Image (cartoon, rainbow, N blue to C red):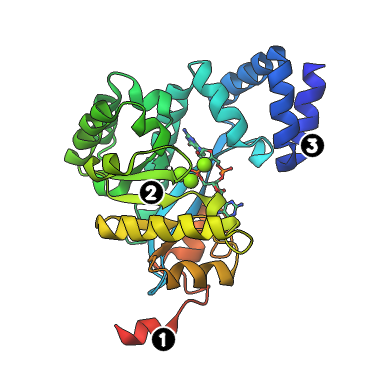
Amino acid sequence: QADAAMDAAKESGRNSYRFYTEELAHQSITQSRVENELRRALGQGELSLAYQPIIEIHSGKVLCAEALIRWENGRVSPDVFVPIAEISGLVGRMTDWVLDEICREQRRWRQLGIPLIPISINVSPVQFKLRGFVDDIERRLREKQFTAEALQIELTETAVMDNVDHSIHIIKRLRGLGIKIALDDFGKGYSSLSYLSRLPIDKIKIDKEFILGFDQSATNRAITDAVIALGTALQLEVVAEGIESREALDYVREQGCRQAQGFYLCKPVPGKTFAALFGDGTASSVVLYPEDRMKR
Ligand code: C2E
Ligand code: MG
Ligand code: MG
Ligand code: MG
């Protein structure tokens, strides 16, 4: 039965998410099945990364590439297997693999003559809290002779707010290495706004749920507007995630947001495709705002 669930999940693709989590709730056996397959996949190099650009709205400049992990060519969503990697203790190995892979990707891009585009990785809350996390990152940067400006780290709001003082300590150390830190999925958690001002972070990423629903919900718009205003007031970079349409891009831009990420700009793509599309450092393939460019 667990095998059937796994197969069904793979077959029905990304829509399997809900079905699959329900399954997981009822069948811990499915979890161990996924866990075993994931362990094997890690060992055999069956994971891959997709890259999605984060774009400066007024200039079209590609500021960063977010690395998003893929398994079975995306047939099983990271929203499903990352939590399983976390509870089964595989997440450390997973992040090690991600770090190695982005180093390789950066090297490939450099060989193609592409000017440095930083890559941001997602770090799981579980791992962020582990002792030795910063030492690990530092050691890997050194081993791979990887410059810290080439790496950025995204932490979820919930992970950071869980223990603010400890988080501040860790974030300070990471930034001391020269790594930029983003607070991901912002708005989804429960952060106290006064804590936000204490966090030594570089940017916040507005959770995509608010942007996806911007045209249907005044509440989502209110939250989006407030987060952009707050981030700007605190002199943080603000990224709007989940930009699926020109209307959404227009909207966040009008609210004063300067950075965007989403399917309208580009879906997550393999590193090779990313290099081909954005190797010149701009999203010239997407129509942005020529009038803004002229004003500057
Ligand atoms: P996230 O870090 O918030 O990543 C953004 C997610 O939004 C990605 O989903 C991306 O494909 C999706 N997305 C981007 N633009 C749009 C859009 O316009 N519309 C919609 N509907 N979605 C968009 P993905 O790749 O499925 O990843 C889901 C989550 O899994 C990530 O959310 C992140 O929390 C986690 N994740 C992904 N890769 C890794 C990883 O290497 N390590 C860890 N620990 N977590 C990861
Ligand atoms: Mg992220
Ligand atoms: Mg996010
Ligand atoms: Mg997310």
Helix, strand or loop status at disc 2: strand
Q: From mark 1 to mark 2, how far is it between C-alphas?
A: 29 Å
Where does label 1 land, which residue?
A: 291
Of the residues tagged 1 and 2, which is closer to the observer?
1
Q: Which mark is residue 136?
A: none
Residue under the image location 42 percent in, 33 percent down: 158
Of the residues tagged 1 and 3, which is closer to the observer?
1
Whether residue 59 is visible to the viewer of this picture, yes or no, is yes
Q: Which mark is residue 11?
A: 3
Residue 23: image location, x then y, percent? 74, 23
Helix, strand or loop status at disc 3: helix
Q: Is residue 216 above or below residue 174?
A: below
- 54 left or right of 9 in image: left
Residue 31: image location, x then y, percent? 66, 17
Residue under the image location 65 percent in, 21 percent down: 34
Q: From mark 1 to mark 3, how far is it between C-alphas?
A: 45 Å
Residue 276: image location, x then y, percent? 50, 63
Where does label 2 land, which residue?
A: 119
* First along the sequence among labels 1 and 2: 2
What amino acid is labelled 1 in the image? Glu
Image quadrant of residue 172? top left
What amino acid is labelled 3 in the image? Glu
What amino acid is labelled 2 in the image? Ile
> In which quadrant will I find the N terminus?
top right
Q: Nearer the viewer, residue 157 or 264?
A: 157
Image quadrant of residue 146? top left
Q: From mark 2 to mark 3, how far is it between C-alphas?
A: 31 Å
* First along the sequence among labels 2 and 3: 3
Whether label 3 lies within 8 Å of ligand 1 gets the answer no
